[in-house]
Image: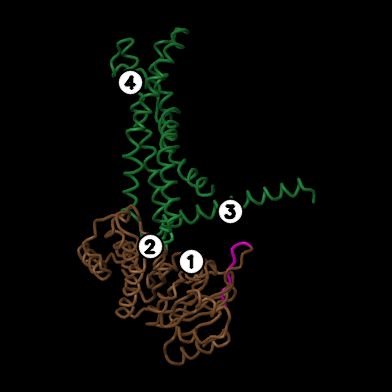
Chain colours: A green, B brown
Amino acid sequence: MTPAASDSNGLITEFLEWFGDLGTFLWRVVRAAVTPPFEFKELFRQLDEVGSMSLPLVALAGGATGVVLSLEARYSLTRFGAKSLLPAAIVFSVIHETGPIITGLVVSGRVGAGIGAELASMKVTEQIDAIEASAVNPYRLLAATRILACILMLPLLTLAADACGLVMGWVAQALVEPLSLHQFINSGFKGADFNDFLPPTFKTAVRPPVQWSCRRCS
Amino acid sequence: MDTIDQIAMKRGNTEENGGAPVIAVEGLHKSFGSQKVLNGISLAVSRSETLAVLGRSGTGKSVLLRLTIGLEKPDSGSVCIHGQDITGLSLDQMGEVRKKMGFLFQHAALYDSLTIGQNVAFPLQHHRRDMSKSEQDDRVKQLLAEVGLEGHLEKMPSEISGGMQKRVGLARALALQPDILLLDEPTAGLDPISSGEIDDLVLKLQEEHHMASIVVTHDLRSAKTVADRLALLNEGNVVIEGSFEELQKSDIEFVKEFLQHS
């Protein structure tokens, strides 16, 4: 076999091992999550850690995004004589994409890095082995609770980011051209339905298992 | 003195005496990559007996302990706890076995986000949900009193010394009243006085609880204090197993050298 072919085989083998590891890890986490005894106390602790503690940062990021959208979209829409569509542009931008993306990035950076550091530290100091030696399933206590907390909290945090984005977008708009919040909301949500709102919000719930798996295997 | 050939005979005598081994390790092999760590280890420990496993650094003593509690899987061989081979058990099945075992890690491995009291209460909260909160608190206080740390409930692990952390680790290991106690270098990193205190504590707990214990150490003085039998490992094998006096009488070169330098 040529060196190039040998290298390719090595890479393919590595990839397949990584994929197998990923599958094994996810299977163990899912199995631990759905079999008793359930770790409700740890889950609630993680809901607070992921949700409550991330709320200020997510709200700030969402609000800033709303302001920037309002200021920049106003300029473009005015050029094309579509200034009246500004509320709708802000609303649809925020709830479709920027709200979920900003939430995902902020929570990923804050919570993801924190969880990674915490579990790495626990591994090095044998705390995870101690959990296992105490006859407690570490996948159930550590992994499943954190993933579940992220899945439950991310859509709610996305709602918070959306709300702050819309409110701050209105504030930025109102500072330039007086417009009541009621008018802004009515104008912005005209023509919107749940299909515009629910899928983008709940897609953030899919991110945690993917992120976790990548982190686990890296 | 026992050479490798006589170990099986001694184990047979143990079983004939009615003291069936609580821990029975048979033909254990373990490698990490190309590094062969254990090369067919066989050991047995009965109830109320303490076996000290000695050897140079890197001879697989801690790996042996981790295999005994199932934190590692052997390449071949068996580990029997109360007659049940644990090497093929799943994580949840192992959990049931581990409820009867206590493990003291080399650096105590306390949960650094929990207080001392919460650390000791951890096994009780997960496995003794039949106990009320006040019963669990009483048990935690009792355990900490046994190891001489009453009054330190609310401290964090980072606020106490290494010796105190080991004591807390011991208290946690005893929370579920195990039949088996595994100690990984309990006196490592401690000054002579603290080491002596830990040895005395282990001896006292052994006398009170009558557990089958394995102590991994390279501290011969500590092994002499706490152990009924000593097993000396070298290059993945048990070179000799017996009392300290039997080790002293041994003609095996490695044993003489080990004792000379200890």
Q: Which residue is mark 4?
A: A185
Q: Closer to us: mark 3 or mark 2?
A: 2
Residue kind at label 2, given as amino acid type: Ala
Label 1, label 2: how far apart the Cα atoms are:
25 Å
Q: Closer to us: mark 2 or mark 4?
A: 2
Q: SS at mark 1?
A: loop
- Residue B64 as seen in the image, left or right of residue B211: right
Range of residues picked out in magenta: B27-33
Label 2, label 4: how far apart the Cα atoms are:
58 Å
Please rate how many residues cluster around mark 1, counting C-alpha atoms within 10 Å: few if below 14, some from 14 to 19, many from 20: few
Mark 4 vs mark 3: tell me if same chain: yes
Using the image, determine if residue A56 lies above or below residue B70.
above
Q: Which residue is mark 2?
A: B108
Q: SS at mark 2?
A: loop
Q: SS at mark 3?
A: helix
- Residue A83 as seen in the image, left or right of residue A186: right
Give whichever of B145, B230 is nearer the camera. Answer: B230
Q: Quadrant of residue A176?
A: top left
Check residue A157 for magenta coloring.
Answer: no
x and y percentages locating residue B238 in the rendered image: 55, 78
Residue kind at label 1, given as amino acid type: Ser
Label 4, label 3: how far apart the Cα atoms are:
49 Å
Q: Which residue is mark 1?
A: B90
Residue kind at label 4, given as amino acid type: Ile
Please rate how many residues cluster around mark 4, counting C-alpha atoms within 10 Å: few if below 14, some from 14 to 19, many from 20: some
x and y percentages locating residue B81 in the rendered image: 45, 77
Q: Which residue is mark 3?
A: A20
Q: Closer to us: mark 1 or mark 2?
A: 2
Q: Closer to us: mark 4 or mark 3?
A: 3
